[in-house]
Image (cartoon, coloured by chain):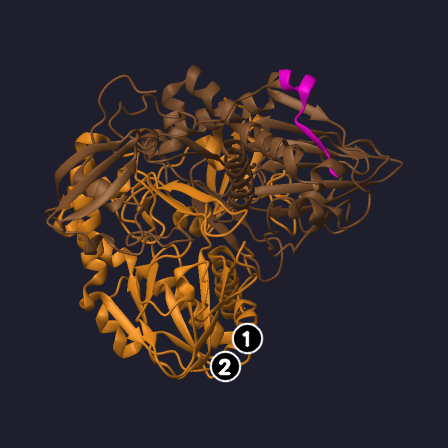
Chain colours: A orange, B brown
Amino acid sequence: MSSGPLRFHAVWLRDNAQDHETRAQGNGQRLIALRDIPAETRIEAAEIAKPGTLEIRFAPERKRVSFDLAWLEAHAYDQAAAAQRGWLEDGVETWDADLMADVPCGDFAALTQGGRALQDWLGQIMRYGFAKVVNAPAAPGTLFDIVGLFGHVRETNYGRHFEVRTEVNPSNLAFTGLGLQAHTDNPYRDPVPTVQVLHCLESSAAGGENMVVDGFAAALRLRAEDPEGFDLLANHCARFEYAGEDGVCLTSRRPMIELAPDGALIGIRFNNRSCAAITDVPFDLMADYYAAYRRLGEIIDDTAMEVTFRLNPGEAFVIDNTRVLHARKGYSGEGTRWLQGCYADMDGLRSTYDAMVRSTALEAAE
Amino acid sequence: MSSGPLRFHAVWLRDNAQDHETRAQGNGQRLIALRDIPAETRIEAAEIAKPGTLEIRFAPERKRVSFDLAWLEAHAYDQAAAAQRGWLEDGVETWDADLMADVPCGDFAALTQGGRALQDWLGQIMRYGFAKVVNAPAAPGTLFDIVGLFGHVRETNYGRHFEVRTEVNPSNLAFTGLGLQAHTDNPYRDPVPTVQVLHCLESSAAGGENMVVDGFAAALRLRAEDPEGFDLLANHCARFEYAGEDGVCLTSRRPMIELAPDGALIGIRFNNRSCAAITDVPFDLMADYYAAYRRLGEIIDDTAMEVTFRLNPGEAFVIDNTRVLHARKGYSGEGTRWLQGCYADMDGLRSTYDAMVRSTALEAAE
């Protein structure tokens, strides 16, 4: 908890009143706009009316509002700002190859029951940016059942889902047997799909193992080694492009390392195949930018960063595509490898998780 | 064109080579990663082999690559960086109430033919952030035909689409007869849906007119009046929340004015109903932050900023939800008002437009 007094502004308190004239019953939406709150709002009186509750009378409205002290403490803003650029939001934990001993995983049948198993599995995706699913049917379309656990498919020009297997005239290198460097998907899309699901139907070919790398861990390792390089990749937009099909010309202008305005690390875009000509870095910085880009790639390629697993038929993995890179080893020869993939979004996943946590907390409080 | 020499780095040129070993035939994706290009790459020789073509031999690979001079000039980065924070990307044009005389609009039947009518209409959405559709059927589901002109529906917890009409126990204030302040939709979602489509089926109630406001124009007006206020809204995250249904708890932490790291104005989030407690602004800046937030709201409410129109049955509008705010006047009494709405994404819209422009340019060149 806090260690000293916490100050709040009158207008902030008034704007965050939870009374029935300010917030709608039921859906909780604010019924008023800031224009409905006088600019000269001030606190006329305040008292602890009963334990844990602060009563405030606002002037000039002469409006009385009760605030829960625990809520105020949880929403205090009278505190030191986060220090270093690249800080991680609460609940995010970086990882490296050591996580291979304990890959986040859920059993399909248990997940479909909802409850604690689903909550824990979603929590792992929030914490680590990915998790496997095991013991699912090896049937086409099962990936939609996995998305249905937490959200909705993001349909794109690739369809509601796509087939990952060797094609004769591939529109995308993903549909060949080539090994693929660890990458995030569709950085040329804005917004990127923030979740990817890959589900294995057949896997008898030699090779084709999947690898995942924590992009946040890679970015923070770059920051530790070369803070200026980290800043270069965060301060300038890269460009990405995909125009491999008729009628499609997807382009984006976004940084490889994305920070919130207050420096929180919120996204990674890394994809050698679809990186377009980078033209938003000033000439004098381009050599250093490329050196940082190269170093980030070396860190991503370092096997000490990588968690490798083989997806067997009926297994899948779900990744936060704004954070975790994925790769696959090359494959060829006898046998088959067939995955189905699709996109979805983290907002639905986070929402499902947070609603479960909230409902669990309410039950515990009853 | 450019007025002086344009410098390029050897590694940048090598990375952007378009030869068949570097880029895949057909889909255009890069076949190599930066790790495949020696760090000590340098230019060994360069000559204008034939008009418009620069031949470069790279060491130590001893690789010869041809570059189109026009391509190099179009992708030059040896130039002054953009000046002021809040600059607009090429092709974006801000507007105010004067646009009411010439609201961007397309005829449904013409749009479904594709070609120039569709290209122009998409171009208007790119330029102004919104456009109307007229003479569409007043039939349920027509909004999906509109989305199909350029992209794919973004399904959310509200479904593939939602019905906008008065409900008895509304899960969202949108489903009442209340007037709604101009807002962007779903700022509590991350990523936000970047396109919204609203299609009118019935409109016999008095009131309920639609209004749109250019959020970019509003932000730039704030910048002109109060540069520090603009910076406050851009430099600090607001918070948004929606938890009006069981199993839903959507939260986001994003600024009201979103800039790319190089200061380009790329997004607006503004919604009084779903703004949560703002806790990421330091205490010493909160009063000024709230003053800027208030002023931005006043600018948005200024009728000089607003384009108003009444949607008649069979009419619709499409908005870039990262830029243009929409509002509706209150309605009640006799008659009905029934709209269907859905979300989609700007990446597909931009892609469709850019592919049409590219294909038109190719035809013109033949």
Residue B272 horizontal/vertical position (percent): 56, 36
Q: Quadrant of the N terminus of chain A?
A: bottom left
Residue A155 horizontal/vertical position (percent): 56, 57
Which residue: 26% across, 47% down? A86
Which residue: 79% across, 49% down? B140
Q: Which residue occupies the foreground of this view, A279 or A352? A: A279
Residue A199 tag number: none
Q: Is residue B107 magenta?
A: yes
Q: Which residue is mark 1?
A: A142
Is B246 situated above or below B108? below
Q: From the viewer's perspective, is A74 left or right of A257?
A: right
Instruction: Name which of mark 1 and mark 2 comes first in the sequence.
Output: 2
What residue type is disc 2 on? Ala
Numbered range of the magenta stretch = B98-108
Q: Which residue is mark 2?
A: A136
Is A166 situated above or below A10? below
